[in-house]
Image (tube, rainbow, N blue to C red):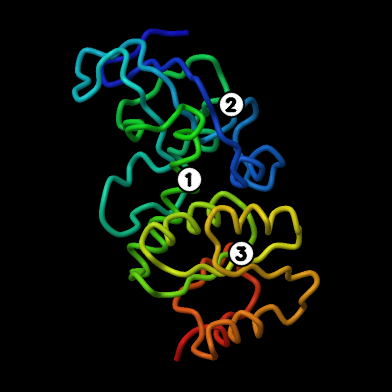
Amino acid sequence: MRAPGANEMRVRMKASCINYHDYGVASGAAPTEDGRILLTDGAGIVESIGSEVTGFLPGDAVLTCIFPQWRSGPPQVSDFSQTPGDGVDGVACDAFTAQAALFTRVPRGYSMAEAATVTTAGVTAWRALLVNGPLKAGETVLVQGSGGVSLYALQIAKALGARVIATSSSPDKLARLRALGADHVINYRDEPEWGRLAHEWTGGKGVDHVVDVGGRLPFRSLLKP
């Protein structure tokens, strides 16, 4: 493994996460260069830093960012050219050397495995609810399935004092969603009109927010007018 350049860090990877985006790259649905090292999200310990790196020291616990060039504000990115595991090599390796701007600190109290799930799924859910929402306490959120974004959205919504309706086709997953705090669960395979049932559960008022991870179903009838 090469030594880091002036603005780079070498990180010893401790955990990584597979998102649907990674599957898309691996399957060829999102074409990239041959030989690309996969996986966007990972967490590890800084081993060494370049001469111009500030804000990080060897021994720091860090995780990767899916869009390192997007630091704040509204969306500024229209491609994955700088995304690890897509436009550049990813974190499916023992040690990973990259620009320091690609990393951020592991949240306090998180294990490496937990931190490795934050960037793609966690930030997507957080942005959907708190930036694009914005979600308020007492409102109702509907989440689809038990994928990473939906699990984060469920827990963020509950932490903010919202009510959550969760859907899945698996009784075991519905039980787990309930254990994570879902106020109401619906098996959409057993209940083809699950949208109507969700609407009825709100007393006919409709839900305030839908975290749509499918992109194919109409939700207008679910929402409050």
Identify the mark nearer the N-term, 2 or 3.
2
Q: Residue at x 65, y 75 (%)?
A: 217
Q: Which mark is residue 120?
A: 1
Quadrant in which the C terminus appears: bottom left
Left or right of 163 on screen, residue 188: right
Query: Mark 1: which amino acid?
Result: Thr
Q: Which mark is residue 144?
A: 3
- x%, y% of residue 12? 45, 15
82 or 162, nearer to the observer: 162
215 or 25, nearer to the observer: 215
Q: Are marks 2 and 1 in contact (CB under 8 Å)?
A: no
The span from disc 2 to disc 3 (Cα, nearest Å) is 30 Å
Q: Residue at x 35, y 23 (%)?
A: 61
In the rendered view, tell whether residue 22 sits above or below residue 9: below
Query: Mark 3: which amino acid?
Result: Gln
Identify the mark nearer the N-term, 2 or 1.
2
Q: Residue at x 65, y 85 (%)?
A: 196
- Viewer-nearest of labels 2 and 3? 3
Q: Which mark is residue 88?
A: none
Instruction: Report the number of numbered marks.
Output: 3
Per the image, label 1 sits on a secondary structure element best described as helix
Q: Which mark is residue 37?
A: 2
Q: Are marks 2 and 3 in contact (CB under 8 Å)?
A: no
Per the image, label 3 sits on a secondary structure element best described as strand
- x%, y% of residue 211? 52, 66
In the rendered view, tell whether residue 147 sits above or below residue 189: above
Q: Residue at x 56, y 69 (%)?
A: 165
